Image (spheres, rainbow, N blue to C red):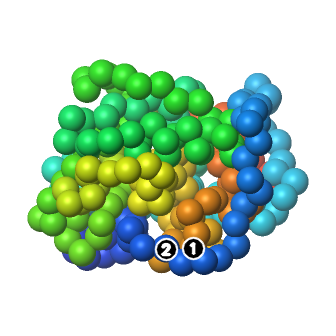
Amino acid sequence: MFVLASLAAVALASACGGSSSSGAGPMAPTPTTSPPSVPVPTGDSSGRIGNLDTAADLMTYNQSVNVGLSVPVEGPIQRMQDSITRWELPVPVYVDPSIKGNCVEEALTYWQSVTGLPFAFVAANAEPRITVRAAGSDELNIAAGLGLVYRTYPNNRAQLGVVKILTSDATCTAPSTLFRHELGHTLGIFGHPSGGLMSSPMVGSTASQREINMLVQLYRLPHGAQIAADGTWRVVH
């Protein structure tokens, strides 16, 4: 059952947005010229995640995050809180003309280089899709950007996501830590794990191994999978 509610814009900015500034910190291994293999489910309807830290992270930063918030323009976040949310691959992305430059493609190429997740550009009216667009301070309040999934199919598969970039930052030169961060949210890291690109504030411009492990494991799970604290999972939708 969907949980619908609204929080103040400043709370939303804190939960989902990012800052364009970053500092020195732990860095992930330098990506190789060949991206890792695409993570795919095994076809099983139940199993166990061997890395309990990764299982706990997926529960905290994917399975249980953002339900109940309301997003200006897009409306309430409508997805179930009892199972994981991810895209069917390749990740479908629409780039609005309000975004100038190649920061979206560079950010997606970066994530593919460290996780193996492929992407494809789609039309404005395609479903499913992530829309990347510029937004004013009336939508973002104090944040420089926001990224999230706000609609899902009945099995909690991602249907609609959005990345909003403050208009003053929407004309960019790659690489952009802000674009990488906000697209990382839409790929499936819905919160802010500490110590890397997805933390708040961001630490460095590359994903930590922790963040990489989260996304790779997420896309090895089938749609509708529910993770338990002991690392076991089963399809519930």
27 relative position to 78: left or right: right
Disc 1 marks which amino acid?
A: Val
Q: Secondary structure at mark 2?
A: strand
Residue 203 numbered mark, or none? 1
Q: Nearer the viewer, residue 92 or 173?
A: 173
Q: Position of residue 127 (x, y in %)?
A: 35, 25
Q: Position of residue 201 (x, y in %)?
A: 48, 77
Query: Can residue 140 be seen?
Result: yes
Residue 20 figure quarter: bottom left
Circles 2 and 1 in contact, beta carbons < 8 Å: yes
* Residue denoted by label 2: 22
Residue 124 figure quarter: top left
Alpha carbons under labels 2 and 1: distance apart = 6 Å
Disc 2 marks which amino acid?
A: Ser
Q: Secondary structure at mark 1?
A: strand
Identify the residue shown where x is 26% and y is 43%.
99
Identify the residue shown where x is 82% and y is 42%.
47
Q: Quadrant of the C terminus?
A: top right
Q: Earlier in the sequence, mark 2 or mark 1?
A: 2
